[in-house]
Image (cartoon, coloured by chain):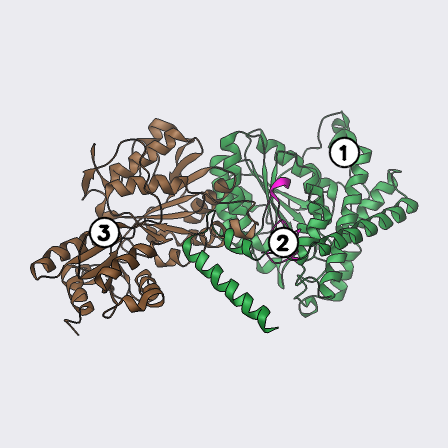
Chain colours: A brown, B green
Amino acid sequence: MPVMNFAQALRDALRYELAHDDAVVVFGEDVGKRGGVFNITEGLQEQFGEERVFDTPLDENGILGMAVGMAVMGLRPVAEIQFVDYLWPGYDPLYSEAAKIRFRSGNQFHVPMVVRSPYGGLVGGGLYHSQSPEALFAHVAGLKVVIPSTPSDAKGLLIASIRDDDPVVFLEHKRMYYALKEEVPEGEHVVPLGKARTVREGEDVTVVTYGMMVHETLKAAEKLEKEGISLHILDLRTLIPFDGDAILHSLERTGRLVIVAEAPRTVSFASEIAAFVAEAAVDLLDGPVVRVTGWDMPFPFKLEKHYMPNVTRIARGVKRALSLLP
Amino acid sequence: MEAHKRKGVPIPIQPFTEEPLRLLDEQGNPVVDFDPEEHLGLSPSRLVKLYEDMVLTREVDRMCWLLQRSGKAAFHISITGHEGAIVGSFYALRPEDWINGYYRTPPAMHVRGIRLAEIFAQLMGTALDPLKGRQMPGHLGAKKAQSFTYGSGVGLAHVVGMGMARALQYRKTGGVVVTYGGEGSTSEPHFHSALNFAGVYRLPLVVMIVNNQYAISVPRTQQTAAKTIAEKGKAYGLPGFYLDGNDPLIVYHVMRQAADRARAGGGPALIEALTYRLDPHSSADDDRKYRSEEEVKHWWERDTLKRMRHFLTLKGLWDEEKEEALKERVRLDVERAVEEAEAAGLPRVEELFEEVYGERPWHLTRQWEELQAEMQEQEGGH
């Protein structure tokens, strides 16, 4: 199997789908000739032409409105929003149209579109190039939300998202684009939506996480292993719909739950997982549920390392779940 | 006008005029010498049918008000006064074209091939409603009629319609998308995004602004400092046509030319049809708070139906007898349609949970089970 970084794996997925389905079109700011500011779509316009892969005006409302319109007419648009921090002019077509069209039209129309967008911090990007607003999509009935953590999953989940018949918000941690490499299956490779991945087997504490925090949690697991604490790590991969069964199965073994995510804590997706377990299986819990998250503040520029969840914060959270720390 | 009397030569139209283009004056007399068949491509029978469909649309609207007032419909948003602009523009389109309507288009949707019973079913949310009772009245759309469903967000039809036009262009169907909105919709970002993208990609899109001079209570002068809405097209590199929207013939003529130009790859167009909302904004509005009875009366005297009837009479195509027969016919058609719509009963509850996503995810299955238990308890309690 070829070794690919995150960016190459995403490009491979786009190339594969463009080649196999003429309903797939890819567009956004700078995605054409420039290949995107993160070079994810590099070479695709050259290969597939300007009708399939094209630049748009600098207008997220136009980009997502266009994607909705194309999708209801049977195309499979893959729209890139350059940074998820800039999506908001396009939130209206996403929230008011894409998410609701199947339902409101009595199933006459549906919206098979994907919004790809980089999210996440630790890139020196300040308030407006670093945020993790997944909860603002996960809250919207009718949308699906996918966040891959490895190159192989990035490819397989993107292909599954493009083939899905409902709108998918697909968030990619920008710090991982060129930082991670692994073997990625060539050609057809589909990772089904809604299934979590067991990243690491463990006995003491279940850690539910997604995106780049999977890797930070792995580092914390190594540190805690030396202290005699064993983590069971689940990578959600899909936030909506999330894999509730995988979480409950794991808790049958560990009885302890920590959720790790870099988004601010209050009304976060981490809170949803905590609430889900509290409602569905409080009897499985032997200790407090702990959310390890970013802080409830705008994302800071110079002091971002103090904002981001890190090995220490995760380890402290695990110890709180084990009632080893107050 | 002599030059234009040759067969097949359309009456030329100019974009960006300061006065609205028209073929008929406020009473319905022709302002230029033209023949509907030769110059507009409207045969006498189609001309009569256009008028009949406008009258039917008004009758549908009247019945919608009655159903609202009697409590059978939750809400109504009137088309009265806009029939020339809306029905006239529908007549200009071809079967391969799509419309993305707004809340005033539903009473006219029979022109697009939606049955009258379905129009009333949508109004009342019965099982015959293509939207399955999910939407408030005034949001009808049907795929079989190439008419997209309306959300409630003003202006979104323009930006989504722009994307629909991009799809038609990509698939080379030869179809055009027409999006509808009031002049208030031109203040929303969606209008600007739609025109900007459509201009850049030369999309087969016509943005149809039905300027009825009020966005609920806010007058047109408070909506924009521009002299016309149509001139906004200039900034996006596309023609903007300012028309008398109570003249169905100029609406038909300009829409047909704009659509044909767009389908031939000539690019998008903006149309502003100036009309007047003869009723309150909706069944929830009290228009006496912001406009005078004299103003409303002034516009009733210029009603689009009157004009069209006058023109048909001038042409020898209409008389009192035909008018009476038509009124009787549409009254019966509408009554029968309401009966059918009401008889359909309520939409199914379980479908609510099936059609949020293509496949029902587990968390919605759980919620459906919760609701079923709740419903069982409610039934048991009665």
Sequence-wise first label, 2 or 1: 1
Q: How many C-alpha atoms fall within 10 Å of the one at disc 1: few (<14), some, or many (≥20)?
A: some
Q: Where is the N terminus of chain B found, in terms of image quarters?
A: top right
Q: Secondary structure at mark 1?
A: loop
Residue B102 in the figure: left or right of residue A274:
right
Disc 2 designates what residue?
Answer: B103
x and y, in percent, of residue B57 in the image = 75, 49
Residue B145 part of the magenta segment:
yes
Specify whether disc 3 shares its chain with disc 1: no
Q: Could you classify mark 2 by the number of other residues whose Cα lies within 10 Å: few (under 14), some (14-19), or many (20 or more)?
A: many
Residue closest to the eye, B154 or B212: B154
Quarter location, residue B338: bottom right
Tell me the tag on residue A212. 3
The image quarter containing residue A165 is: top left
* The C terminus of chain B - image quarter: bottom right
Chain ID for label 2?
A: B
| Badge 2 vs badge 3, beta-carbon distance below 8 Å | no
Q: Quadrant of residue A91?
A: bottom left
Image disc number at residue B163 = none
Q: Secondary structure at mark 3?
A: loop
Q: Position of residue A13 (x, y in %)?
A: 32, 36
Q: Does mark 3 fall on the same chain as mark 2?
A: no
Which residue is label 1 attached to? B42
Nearest the camera: B146 or B361?
Answer: B361
The amino acid marked with disc number 3 is: Met
Residue range of the region highlighted in magenta in the rendering:
B125-148
